[in-house]
Amino acid sequence: CLMNRSPLPDDRQTNITAKIPSKKDSESPHLSDIGESELKAVLVHLDNLSPHERQIIENIPHRVIALEDELFKKIVELQEENARLRSEALIDSLTGLYNNRFFRVQLETEMARTRRTGLSCCLLMIDLDNFKSINDTRGHLEGDRFLAQTAQTFSQCVRAVDIVCRYGGDEFVAILPSTRLFVAIRIANRFKNAVCEIPGATGYNVSASVGIAEFTVSSPWDANEFIRAADSAMYEAKGRGGNQVAIKGHSIRINNGIESVTTEEKEAISGMHDNEQAQGESDGK
């Protein structure tokens, strides 16, 4: 089961028909290579044609080649196999989340979007505290089961626009597009709290440390530096005992369900216009 992802660009099936176009087909830009003195058999990918080109194909005299059933079946099977391989290359087989390869590509995309639109994006680095104890006491199969359940839980913690990926081992990352820091804090704490609710987490003493980094138009980072910033914050959270959220050197501890907010976070919130804050509250729910 693939979770927390939209269909990949090439996950669609392409309708294919084999035709022998007439000379009139040369009116279509895609069919302009048809010679004047002979007819050629071509495969026309209907999904690649514009509405105008489709109209040309439908209106011109042509002959349709009836492909042998086995040949047509092979073509369809090859298309489906290619789509499957493209998808698997970007999906982590254990968790069903996007893998590190996709994460790197998408992070660059969101950073470019921030530079273009001026809307900041945030990155969460999430590490499972004491996860090794599961492998050591119950074996790697139980560890794999816990990771898969964690991935499913994380997929339910995010908004539709957010992208959760398995970074490697027991580390996960979440890209939060067009997201201000105070909304990222809310989502990060949701991740942290959700881990404690996973069956078996309390018995294994497993929790989550979450690091947050915010990328703005004034950030001097490239993708690697953006990752290092979130990673550094995550390690600071672990160094303070784990089960915490840290932001650029400042940690947030949950005490009786109440979040302690740093001065920087208060200034970030108070500096927002009312409508921006209302939108952020809505997005973070």
Image (tube, rainbow, N blue to C red):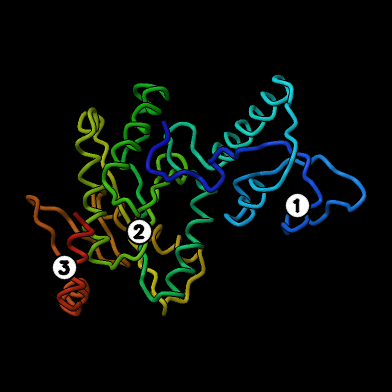
Q: Which mark is residue 83?
A: none
- Name the foreground residue: 244 vs 113: 113
Q: Earlier in the sequence, mark 3 or mark 1?
A: 1
Residue 250 horizontal/vertical position (percent): 26, 66
Quadrant including the C terminus:
bottom left
| For residue 228, side relative to residue 149 (left or right) | right
**Amino acid at the residue labelled 2:** Leu
Q: Earlier in the sequence, mark 2 or mark 1?
A: 1
Choose mark 2 or mark 1, whichever is in front.
Answer: 1
| For residue 77, side relative to residue 117 (left or right) | right
**Amino acid at the residue labelled 1:** Asp
- Name the foreground residue: 224 vs 232: 224
Please give the count of numbered marks on the rendered protein.
3
Quadrant including the N terminus:
top left
Q: Kindly identify which residue carries mark 3.
A: 278
Q: Is 11 drawn above or below residue 49 in the view shown?
A: above
Q: Kindly identify which residue carries mark 1.
A: 25
Residue 129 horizontal/vertical position (percent): 31, 42
| For residue 282, side relative to residue 45 (left or right) | left
Q: Going 35% across and 58% down the picture, which residue do you hit?
A: 176
Residue 153 horizontal/vertical position (percent): 28, 38
Category of crowding for the residue at label 3, using alpha-carbon neighbours closer than 10 angstroms: few (below 14), some (14–19), many (at least 20) = few
Q: Kindly identify which residue carries mark 2.
A: 176
Q: Going 50% across and 39% down the picture, which residue do you hit?
A: 91
| Helix, strand or loop for disc 2 | strand
Choose mark 3 or mark 2, whichever is in front.
Answer: 3
Quote the CA–CA distance across marks 2 and 1.
48 Å
Residue 19 horizontal/vertical position (percent): 74, 38
Category of crowding for the residue at label 1, using alpha-carbon neighbours closer than 10 angstroms: few (below 14), some (14–19), many (at least 20) = many
Q: Is 246 drawn above or below residue 63 in the view shown?
A: below
